[in-house]
Image: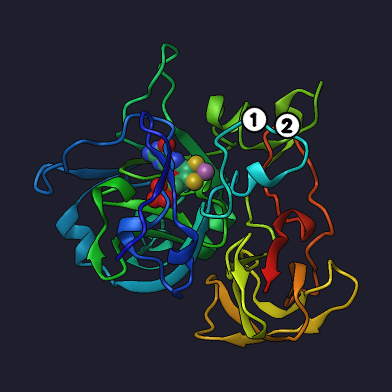
Amino acid sequence: MKKKMRVMTEKPLNAETPIEALRTWTTDNEVFFKRNQGQIMQRPIKLTTWKLSIDGLVKHKLNLSFEEIRRMPKVEVTNTLECSGNSRSLLEKKASGNPWTIGGVGNAVWGGVWLKDLLTKAELKKDARHVSFEGFDKPLGKAGIKFIRSIQLEKALDSTLLAYEMNGQPLPLKHGFPLRALALGWTGANCVKWLHKITVLDQPYEGFFMDRVYRVFQKGEDPKTGGVVKEINIKSIIVEPANAETLPAGIVPIRGAAYAGEAGIQAVDVSVDDGKTWQPASLIGPQENYAWRHWEYLWEVRQTGEFTIMARATDTRGRQQPETANWNVLGYGNNGIREHAIIVQIK
Ligand SMILES: Nc1nc2c(c(=O)[nH]1)N[C@H]1C(S)=C(S)[C@@H](COP(=O)(O)O)O[C@H]1N2
Ligand SMILES: [Mo]
């Protein structure tokens, strides 16, 4: 039986994946985390009336039907999507936002077209530098601010997908039907759902969701002076055993997932003694660009008692997870080794 999602808020819908559902390499659509700023679409839009417009600094404005997009070369990419605020609730010092544990992440096979193919069709003008995305979900709250986000042109041309399929299914309504952006290896905030409008700009889009949030800043600082959240931080999570579980002595499998945005995973080490000593874990399962890598460590334990287990990932660029997270006001990018430790009892 599938474990239910943990719903943090109903309106907007914010719900995290149960940890058990992170044990498979791809995450089932039904339990894939859902994160929204606005009122999610209640009914799927009619595909025969839906259009995607490409406007701004292009030589030919485009207004494409779903069929036209479907007739373009299709690509399938496995990509791990993580919300910038994932693991926020594990920070020792409180940060504001949804109290995610580790379930604000998932891995899926996405089918769609390269954004580059559309931008090539539209032909960029000389000043093109950024690309903004707008969905047709309605804002919640009095301010009525739409969730509009932009990314650098370089990323848009290099590795941004417009997806209409998720794990072999038409993109589910809650995940942006019929089309969403996916800046591969970047946090969810860069992956606009229910996409209907793309604008090519000469500078980043300015607005609440670019300038006030999804920025890394400290207390007393103007959010706008902080860096924009882009690439997913290197991180490992433990998905088995569960925190606070009691287990018999013997061979205890410790398993998890590790991911590093645009980079691959080089190694994962595990400690069962609160970080004093480390042993290498085995990387298991499929290995693909932009997708997390599953790992396991078969722990032979003879003693009884309480044990603190930690995992530490190293990526193909040689970067390693920090001992503790770099705190910021909105609690983005928590990838601290210590914050992700679990405690188990051996009986
Ligand atoms: N249109 C629209 N797209 C959106 C959002 C939103 O509120 N509206 N939220 C973003 C954020 S912050 C995240 S983490 C991801 C979550 O994607 P998911 O719900 O498919 O997991 O969607 C992104 N795209
Ligand atoms: Mo997010």
> Which corner quadrant of the image does residue 313 belong to?
bottom right
> Which corner quadrant of the image does residue 287 belong to?
bottom right
Q: Is residue 212 above or below residue 68?
A: above
Q: CA distance from mark 1 to mark 2?
A: 7 Å
Within-10-Å neighbours for mark 2: few <14, some 14–19, many 20+: some
- The dot on residue 329 is 2
Residue at the (78%, 74%) spot, across then down: 272
Task: Say if residue 58 shows up in the picture.
Answer: no
- The dot on residue 96 is 1
Residue at the (31%, 69%) spot, across then down: 167
Q: How many marks?
A: 2
Indicate the position of residue 255 as horizontal and vertical percent values: 60, 76
- The dot on residue 230 is none
In screen coordinates, is 234 left or right of 85?
right
Say whether marks 1 and 2 touch (CB < 8 Å). yes
Check disc 1 and give the amino acid type.
Ser
Choose between 77 and 303: the one closer to the eye.
303
Does mark 2's beta carbon lie closer than 8 Å to ligand 2?
no
Of labels 1 and 2, earlier in sequence is 1
